[in-house]
Amino acid sequence: MHAPERRHNDAAADAFFAQKRTGEDIARIKAQDEPTPPDLVHAWQERSENRRMAREILAIAEEYFTDHEVELRARVAEVSCARFRGEMLPLDVYTEPRRHALEFASRGYLRANAASPTSSLTIFRWLTTDYAQRRPDITL
């Protein structure tokens, strides 16, 4: 937006908000307002609570992962080798340790599913953090 257009818009906005409203104008504006439907308010409150819970669980999982990263990775490597020997696909060594930390952090929460990898992009990004830091297997 160019400066002359911005000044024009600022002047128009100032004039609009400086204008005194009559009782009729205020009544007309208030008549346009409708109360928010209770089911919408309930859905918003539940979604807010789920997000708060997911952030809380994620903070616990991050702390747990930081403190126990070596053990988590060793356990995943052990299980992955056992699966491979049993002719099963190995576990994903990048996301599985973080998934275990998330599972640990979710214990005891009534809304633990709020922090599932499919419920939140933030959780998914946290789980796949190690992919971004991973170097290519083959160098050219």
Image: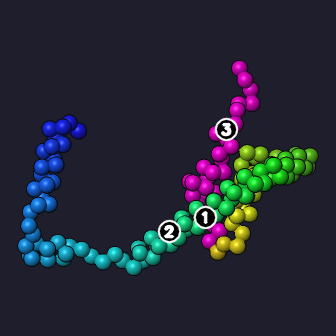
Residue 104 is covered by the magenta coloring? no
State which mark lies toward you, 3 or 2. Answer: 3
For residue 63, side relative to residue 84 (left or right): left
Task: Name the amino acid type tagged 1.
Answer: Glu
Which coloring applies here? rainbow
- Which callout, 1 or 3, points at the residue further toward the start of the chain? 1
Disc 3 is placed on an element classified as helix
Tell me which numbered mark, 1 or 2, is placed earlier along the sequence: 2
Does the magenta-highlighted stretch encompass residue 121?
Answer: yes
Q: Quadrant of the N terminus?
A: top left
Q: Residue at x 7, y 73 (%)?
A: 22
Residue found 69% across the figure and 57% down from its top? 63
Q: Taking the image as drawn, is residue 76 in sight?
A: no
Label 1 environment density (alpha carbons within 10 Å; few <14, some 14–19, many ≥20): some
Which residue type does callout 3 highlight? Gln
Q: Residue at x 14, y 38 (%)?
A: 4
Q: Is residue 6 above or below residue 104?
A: above
Q: Under tag 1, what secondary structure?
A: helix
Query: Which part of the image, by quadrant, shows the C terminus?
Result: top right
Q: Which residue is mark 1?
A: 56
Q: Which mark is residue 47?
A: 2
Q: How far, Cα to Cα, is label 1 from label 3?
A: 25 Å
Nearer to me, 41 or 71: 71
At x 69%, y 66%, the residue is 106
Direction from residue 19 to residue 122 in the image, left or right: right
Q: Amino acid at mark 2?
A: Arg
Task: Specify the segment rendered in magenta.
Answer: 111-140
Q: Could you say where residue 16 lies in the image, as x and y percent from the top left?
A: 12, 58
Quadrant in which residue 2 is drawn: top left
Q: Earlier in the sequence, mark 3 or mark 2?
A: 2
Q: CA distance from mark 3 to mark 2?
A: 32 Å
Which mark is drawn over residue 133?
Answer: 3
